Amino acid sequence: MDTNLTLPVIPPDANKYTRGSLLVFAGSRRYFGAGVLTALAAEKTGAGYVSLATPKSSALAARQHLLCSPVIEAAEDTVQGCFAATSLPDVLKEIRRISALCVGPGLTANEHTAAFLRELLRHALEEHISLLLDADALSILAAKPELMGRLQRERQLYELDEERHTAFVLTPHEGELARLHNALFPAPRFEGEAPWPATKLRVAVAQAAQELSRELGGVIVAKGATTYIAGRGEFFESNKATPALAKAGTGDVLSGIISSLLAQGMPAMDAALLGVEIHSLAGVAAEQKQGRRSVTALDVIEALPQALLSFES
């Protein structure tokens, strides 16, 4: 895949808000690191103001790792330490401007986070804020037909009035892609037949990504050894990544990269394409330094500046 894309120009009179304000909703008591990785990657990729909203019990740990980004404590479900259904309003009071939202890493999928995601989707679509959904947000989406319906209605709105459309990117791995695809295109059931496994695709990954994009209207980044990017009738594949990226947390890094580009004003398809390229090159650079076996998500973040230099205009 050769995108011929470059990073947004940073003008001499730029300030932290004109460079893009990204709000990340991520983490839980068990998975506090997911939000940290996402925010760190977004910082390195160039958004001027990155904020992490995370449940109260994971906020202290997040603050110990994020020195440049504010951490906003959100109301939480005390059982699992995840976002509560009522988390959104108080978080939004803390943020002056939002250019883009990133939602999902380490979220935890349950009824509390489903109610939270419902309100967040409503807000993002009504305010036309660019949006990236990843990880547990995708599992919730697949399990809640009414949330999927919100995105389908957004596709219909785009067809009627492109100016009122909210750009969004979904970044599923193969299991998440299968859940989303099977929710939209359920397999026919015959008497006595066992249900199709929720995490198994009935079609090729490339086909599923394209069908999902056509149905929802957004950009789909189907992550894997080969990554497929589908959106607005376009389709690309990338084979530049390394198996060194097959480590926990590297998907959170990709979410941070793409959502940072969205916050900087890039169209969703361009942000997805360039984000995948940057992530792949950073993985290769990290492998050259650390060796394939030892690369971690933090190593990929540290290699982002080297990868980004390839795309400066």
Image (tube, helix red, strand yellow):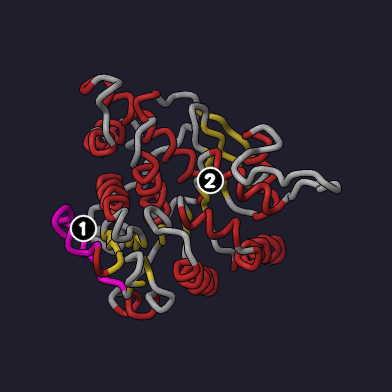
Depth check, front residue: 246 or 99: 246
- In the picture, measured across the screen, residue 33 lies left or right of residue 118, that is left
- In the picture, measured across the screen, residue 234 lies left or right of residue 311, that is right
Q: Residues within 10 Å of mark 2 (few under 14, many from 20)?
A: many
* Disc 2: which residue: 269
* Disc 1: which residue: 62
- Tell me what residue is drawn at x 34 percent, y 25 percent: 244
Q: Residues within 10 Å of mark 1 (few under 14, many from 20)?
A: many
Depth check, front residue: 274 or 125: 125
What's the magenta region? 58-74
Label 2 – label 1 distance at C-alpha: 30 Å
* Among the 4 quarters of the image, the one containing residue 154: bottom right
Is residue 307 positioned above or below 195 on the image?
A: above
Residue sticking out furthest to the front: 192
Percent of width and height locating residue 193: 79, 44
Q: Amino acid at mark 1?
A: Ala
